[in-house]
Image (cartoon, grey):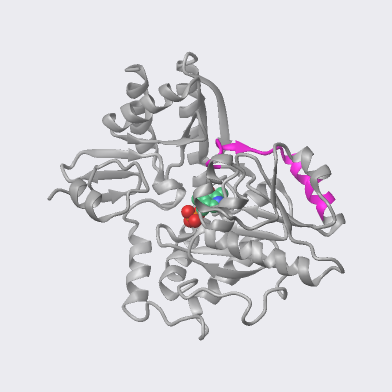
Amino acid sequence: MNLEAVDKAFVLQTYARNYVNFKKGVNATLFDENEKDYIDFTSGIGVVAVGHGNKQVADAICEQVNNITHISNLYAIEPQAFLGKKLNELSGMDVGTFFANSGAEANEGAIKLARKYGETKFDNKRYKVITLAHSFHGRTITTVKATGQKKMHSPNFSPYPDGFSYDHYLKDIYTSIDDETVAVMIELVQGEGGVQPLDKEEVQKLAAFLKEKDILLIIDEVQTGVYRTGEFLATNLYEIQPDIITLAKGLGGGVPIGAVMTKHKDILTVGDHGSTFGGNYLSCAAANEVITILEDYKVSGALDEAIIYFESKLRALYEKYPQHFFREVGLGLMRGLRVTDEETLSAIINNAFQEGVLALKAGKNTLRLLPPLTITKEEMDEGFRRLDNAISKI
Ligand SMILES: *Cc1c(COP(=O)(O)O)cnc(C)c1O
């Protein structure tokens, strides 16, 4: 049986998969079983921030798992404590962290924290959470309900938890708030929704308003966090101080990890929340190494250089094909081009794959590019050359 047959027989088919068999990765370059190479402009959907086959991360993981992989949260975990300290320092806020295994699990934790805040801090129960249309917050029953996309709320999975509503624009939130609203949860750059950054001034204005009303601001940085937008957090770029920030994708360099960071360190107490695997030795050792690498990379100026180079390459492509693209969107190394129609976008992504470059779709019509942050200029040159070839064949 070949890979496709085994996969189709034994793995639930919840993804429309591509049956390439990747065997090796070196930074932003992947090799399949026939040794054909692909430039990876997806980094596993914003996960492999320090590239494939990163030796430093691999060594840190090996050293850790040769000693202890997992011990449970019933005991203190040194790399977890250090990671918490590091997140506190890099965020620029005095936060404590709960560690989970994924973005959805981190957002679940954030919502639980907000709900308890709403239950215990006020005379009346506050439990409602407002999110934005086209948002994406995860695939569990609660986070799917928090996701502001109708198509995600299939009756197949109902009933969903109460207390979620969606606004199209930040300015609508002011009038949607009522005395039962406990939190507003947003992505600063909507990832799945179309790589759409929010307006900085509008976000700052909303943050100040929510603070005054004692309504929590939750920033879902599952995709934007860990230097994806050029700063450690998009929150830093927007110069706000949210109540809760969630992280996941880029944090572990491919090892599953999620994080709920909050200034409200004493809301969740013993027994309120937990996770068997969350923050274990393996994932925290990986995350500590990823952060060490990326912190140096940022401080040296190399990250900003990579962003500028990627930006210029993308702009050239955008300008070359005005018949296909009508807008550039995104920040840092989270970028998109709006494509005239869905069919053209599918054709671009399919052709790109044939040419040996991996790209993503976001929303209905956005070509989304999320390369490893450590992508080299040579890899960018080659990736954009292939992408150009792919588009020229439309
Ligand atoms: C990917 C993503 C999630 C879900 O993360 P999982 O690890 O797949 O559960 C949540 N929020 C945002 C903004 C994301 O991009």
Question: Image check: 52 left or right of 47?
Answer: left
Give the x, y percent position of residue 393: 32, 17
Residue at left offset 45%, top offset 16%: 320
Picture mark count: 0
Q: Residue furthest bottom?
A: 75
Q: Residue furthest left?
A: 1
Magenta-span inclusion, residue 272: no
Rendered-image quadrant of the C terminus: top left
Q: Residue 88 appears in which quarter of the rendering?
A: bottom right
The answer, for residue 10, to whether it is visible in the render is yes
Question: Image check: 318 left or right of 97?
Answer: left
Give the x, y percent position of residue 131: 68, 47
Question: Image check: 8 left or right of 151?
Answer: left
Q: Residue 194 appears in which quarter of the rendering?
A: top right
Residue at left offset 31%, top offset 26%: 351
Question: Image check: 116 left or right of 328?
Answer: right
> Looking at the image, is 371 positioned above or below residue 92?
above
Give the x, y percent position of residue 344: 42, 21
Magenta-span inclusion, residue 194: yes
Q: Which residues are magenta?
A: 191-210
Give the x, y percent position of residue 255: 40, 62
> Looking at the image, is 202 positioned above or below residue 246?
above
The answer, for residue 298, to whether it is visible in the render is no
> Looking at the image, is 128 positioned above or below residue 189?
below
> Looking at the image, is 310 positioned above or below residue 394?
below
Residue at left offset 40%, top offset 71%: 282
